[in-house]
Image (cartoon, grey):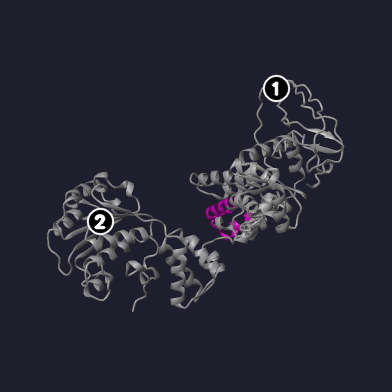
Amino acid sequence: MAYKALYRTYRPQTFEEVAGQEHIVKTLKNALATGKIAHAYLFAGPRGTGKTTMAKLFAKALNCEHGLGCQCNECKNCVAITEGSHPDVLELDAASNNGVDEIRELIDKVKYGTILGKYKVYIIDEVHMLSTGAFNALLKTLEEPPEHVIFILATTEPHKILPTILSRCQRYDFNKVSEKDIKERLRAVLQNEGVEFNEEAVELVVQLADGGMRDALSILEKVLAFSGNTLNVNDILSIFALESKEEKIKLIHSIINHDMSDVLSRLNNYVSKGTDIKRLTEDLLLILKDIVIFNSSANKDYLETLNEEEATELSRNVPSDLAIQMIDILMSTVKDYKNVTSINPIFEITLIKLTSLDTVVKPVMTTPKVTKVEPVIEQKKQEPTYIHTPEPVKEVVKTVVEEKKEKVPQLEGDITINDNVIYLKDAEKEDNFEINDSLMVNVMVVSKKEIKAELLDGWKNIKRLATHPVVGKAATLLIDGRPLVASKNIVVLEYAMPKLAEKVNSKDMQAELQTVIEHIFNRKMFIYGVSRNKSVDLQSLYMNLLQIGRLPKAKDITLDFIGE
């Protein structure tokens, strides 16, 4: 018996075997069950997602001898449709039969009755390839075909079909098959074929398939032809000229470390091996996207390429602003690939740009009109809170800036210093703690990435206390936030909703919040909340101060937790 390709061998024979497209399967089943059969269908969607397969299954369900909607795969109609020899199910490839004469010949046959089945089914694949004359010739018949005739048009480019044709068809849009469905089908095929495999290799095949079930089986078949009876990552990387995820992560580390020599050495290695540079660029984009998402959410469920451990490691070294800048450069590079004959020089220039980026991203400075401001006079002593600084400062002065120079960012808010203790504005009068910008900048200066990473790693563990009768409310409030910066004894949380940040800063909540943090992380910390908008403002202020050299030195700042 002649060899049959995997995608043909494992083509679904019933609706239940179709991978994905549940919405289409359900609709067609209901139409068959109620007898509401349209005279013309349009199946549109990406290649390899099951359009032609679904058309043949529908034809089988229309003509099965066991009744409308059945697919027994045993009667002569089902067997003939499966083998492609049924006289009443005619498949036309419009890519090679797109003229008026071919369509007129098809129309002439429409008037004749069926031979074996109940319905004559015409499946026209790649229908968008028909000429305008062919479409016009088909138009009248498609609008009012005989009762025993059903047209199924399949296309990857529905926008190229005449509106008059589209309006006469019942349209079904096929989606890319989900990774989960492709994985399940590949595992079943591999087990049935007796092939040894590992999950990482299966996932790599799924990524290469890009939502196409047929592509996934074709890729699998190609790899098995190369490696024999095993499926492993190294063979896939070798066949498709790809780089491993570990190699891409190492490249990113070299870029952020400004190691130009190592970056260019890796590039030379890619070129000598014939690596698919376009694919490598796209993979770097996906990794950086994962970093931005993980920095923002700390949720591994949203990761597409990286695992939690890899994302945690990279997020410590690649801030979101830097990752976004790198993404912008790479996206511009992908566009440039379309306009050049050789992409290697473009990729080399891109790597040089990325490696030359500042590790700390600087925002764009504006130059608004500056006015002179008188110094703020020292205010009266107020009740202390949780934070103190080592050296007394007599007053906070708003700097007078000369005309025609960039505006120096000012630290707003009232601060008075006495006996080395920073007092918060009206602390004894308000129900909520309020830390002004001056103090927040100090907190950001002495913050530690490793402490923030520790909190992010274990933040999900706070959920264990969500149902606690005493601190459950505080735990739930903490879960809704995300550590923004953290030093030894203070953590600032970012909240999407300002009202949640206000609740965190309530003096009544502080003891319970500290109890939860101490229980989970074994750290005694003061907890403070800011809204997302406030977080953006603070980070902008920090970067502006850094740029003009006005940022306080970490060695000159001590922020110790005092207690209740």
Question: Does the segment drawn in magenta span residue 209?
Answer: no
Q: Amino acid at mark 1?
A: Val
Residue bearing mark 2: 97
Image coordinates of residue 424 in percent, x first then y, are 76, 36
Is residue 262 at least partly visible in the picture? Answer: no
Image coordinates of residue 183 in percent, x first then y, are 47, 66
Of labels 1 and 2, the one closer to you? 1
Where 42 falls versus 405 (above or below)?
Answer: below
CA separation, marks 1 and 2?
73 Å
Q: Amino acid at mark 2?
A: Asn
Is residue 533 at least partly visible in the picture? Answer: yes
Q: Residue furthest front?
A: 469
| 487 lies left or right of 7 | right
- The image quarter containing residue 310 is bottom right
Image coordinates of residue 438 in percent, x first then y, are 75, 35
Image coordinates of residue 479 in percent, x first then y, are 62, 52
Where 404 falls versus 102 (above or below)?
Answer: above
Neighbour tally class for label 2: few under 14, some 14-19, many 20 plus, Cα within 10 Å: some
**Labels 1 and 2: the sequence-earlier one:** 2
Where 71 falls versus 122 (above or below)?
Answer: below
| 357 lies left or right of 84 | right
Predominant SS along the magenta part = helix
Residue bearing mark 1: 370
SS of the residue at dot 1? Answer: loop
SS of the residue at dot 2? Answer: loop
Magenta highlight range:
266-289
Query: Foreground: 411 or 184?
Result: 411
Query: Foreground: 195 or 76?
Result: 76
